[in-house]
Image (cartoon, coloured by chain):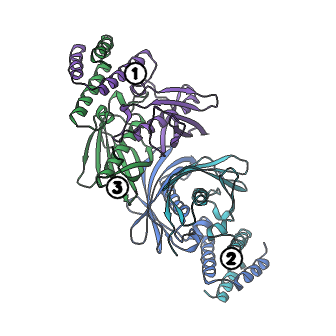
Chain colours: A green, B purple, C cyan, D blue
Amino acid sequence: MEEKQLLHKLNTFLEESSEEERTLLDIIVDGFTKKRRGDYKTYLDAMTHIETRMLDSGEYEIVLPVQPLIENPLKMVHGGMTATLLDTTMGSLVNQSLPADSTALTAEMNVHYLKPGLGKHLRCVASLTHKGKQLCVTEGKVYDQNGKLVAIATATFFIITKPKK
Amino acid sequence: MEEKQLLHKLNTFLEESSEEERTLLDIIVDGFTKKRRGDYKTYLDAMTHIETRMLDSGEYEIVLPVQPLIENPLKMVHGGMTATLLDTTMGSLVNQSLPADSTALTAEMNVHYLKPGLGKHLRCVASLTHKGKQLCVTEGKVYDQNGKLVAIATATFFIITKPKK
Amino acid sequence: MEEKQLLHKLNTFLEESSEEERTLLDIIVDGFTKKRRGDYKTYLDAMTHIETRMLDSGEYEIVLPVQPLIENPLKMVHGGMTATLLDTTMGSLVNQSLPADSTALTAEMNVHYLKPGLGKHLRCVASLTHKGKQLCVTEGKVYDQNGKLVAIATATFFIITKPKK
Amino acid sequence: MEEKQLLHKLNTFLEESSEEERTLLDIIVDGFTKKRRGDYKTYLDAMTHIETRMLDSGEYEIVLPVQPLIENPLKMVHGGMTATLLDTTMGSLVNQSLPADSTALTAEMNVHYLKPGLGKHLRCVASLTHKGKQLCVTEGKVYDQNGKLVAIATATFFIITKPKK
């Protein structure tokens, strides 16, 4: 799509836009800009503005800001987005522990939803429970801004040699 | 955010935009427009342009177009988005079977990933395995465009009286 | 333990035994005798008198007679024994499909309990959902004598070269 | 079955019995005797001689001696028996926390097997992750005698009013 054409479309969309729609577009463009700079590898991570870090404990943490883009019809964080947060955090932790030519694929994930995902952000912490040559098992916990447990998960990752690009 | 300010920001972003970025913004604005029309209840459903329908068999089907917005760093559909597709399809099926004042919350979901989510779209079919008064158990299967199984899942839903708005 | 000593102990036990205790000992000795004949590979299979067969559909079936030996305090089949039935049926199916020098280890199993395991027997049917080189995914369903669904499960098996004896 | 008839059958069985068979019968009769005394509620708990206790931490612990009765064809603890251990430990913990007229039914259990169950005993520790009015979520971990992790599990329990006898 050409730049001019898209700008026209955006212009038309904005004419009748709500405050919420504008906020979301703003969040998305900010995310895409960060991805362009190399801050994020995927559009999904970029749009959701996750913040990732390795903890001194050997655990991995990702913070996900709560915003309408990731909510379900009940205005809570969509269970699938909580699953995405868990999968990304646990997978990042496993990949962190692998040599550069290997990568981890999620073979299986089990999520328990304990309370609605509400508030300003969700924080996910993943730990490596078992590190085998081909299979890794991880545990992940999701907390809300008050430190209350929102979800817990376990997952099995299968280690493969990275496909060449 | 004001319309003028956002338009300026979008304009600046588009100046150096790639073809892919423009395509994604186009997909997003199209989705948001459909949501405004009432075609979708959530921004997530709208952005991902899912197509939902009840099948004559009593099963529920959702088709999810594959696009860069939902991909992981390996350029396959992110496992979390496959989980989102499964959760939405199974949850929609359960809600379909409930009286208007009730709704279903995902208590637990288990997903097995069988092959990478590639191709033009993923198609999810959910069936109701057990319908109790308070707990429902469902099964979901995700296929690629060639009908190959990409993922299978089971989930437990807890039935509650809808919170009043 | 010497034969004489054990016989004495059994004798003493039987003097005050209930009808149920005698029935169970009878079931156990019958099972152990069948194992001695080579009908069963394990004491657990022998004591529980499971009946296994490959179905023409490519599925595997195991029938488990219900008896006090496998019941929980509520006089239903213990959830762990239902899990054992599922694990054995799904694992047998996978092993059936492997070359003689390979065997399958359960990496992960997920069980949903739908209704109490009651009646004369439980029947489990397992199907092979995905057959990879190293990972297999199976589905299992447990029915009571009236054909009602008691439990469903999925499992991931990891294929290894058989350890040499 | 009459006492005399059973004694005759046992006698015949013992004539050609192996050391292992005698040991197992001994273990079983000891277990049944303990059940008669009220030490165990079920034959399954009795035969497997589990030892249960509530820990000061609020966790629940069960130790399961390893013996041929609970082994699979590879001479490791059968995955189903590990699942039984986990289900019993997690269920006991939940029941411990309930009023006398309520009981917990396992709605769903997910088990990851990390290494073979070998050695003298397996030790399972369960903790209560979430206590709702109707749903409880627990985590369980199984260790071998050296403290190595053998399996981890999560489970969802559904609370009901105890059925009247």
Which residue is the site of mark 3? Answer: A128
* Label 1 chain ID: B
Query: How would you rate the neighbour count of disc 3 (Cα within 10 Å): few for under 14, some for 14-19, many for 20 or more?
Result: many
Give left or right: position of A98 versus D130: left
Q: Position of residue B70 (x, y in %)?
A: 38, 34
Instruction: Judge by depth and name the residue closer to the eye, B69 or D72.
Output: B69
> Can residue D102 be seen in this snapshot?
no
- What is the x, y in percent for residue D37? 61, 72
Q: Amino acid at mark 1?
A: Gly
Q: Return the mark for residue B31.
A: 1
From the viewer's perspective, is residue B117 above or below residue D136? above
CB contact under 8 Å: marks 3 and 2: no
Q: Secondary structure at mark 1?
A: helix
Task: Determine whether, in the image, residue C65 is placed left or right of residue D134.
Answer: right
The kind of secondary structure element at disc 2 is helix
Q: Residue at x 59, y 72 (%)?
A: D69
- Letter of the chain that mark 2 sits on in the rendering: C
Residue D99 lies, in percent from the top left, at 51, 51
Share a chain, discs 1 and 2? no
What is the distance, in whole Å, between disc 3 and disc 1 at their CAs? 38 Å
Q: Which residue occupies the foreground of this view, D159 or A87? A: A87
At 52% from the left and 76% from the top, the residue drawn is: C165
Residue assigned mark 2: C36
Compared across the picture, whether A164 is left or right of C120 comes to left
Going by the image, does D90 lie left or right of B19? right
Q: CA distance from mark 3 to mark 2?
A: 44 Å
**Quadrant containing the C terminus of chain B in the rendered view:** top left
Going by the numbered disc 3, the residue's amino acid type is: Leu
The front one of D74 and D165 is: D74
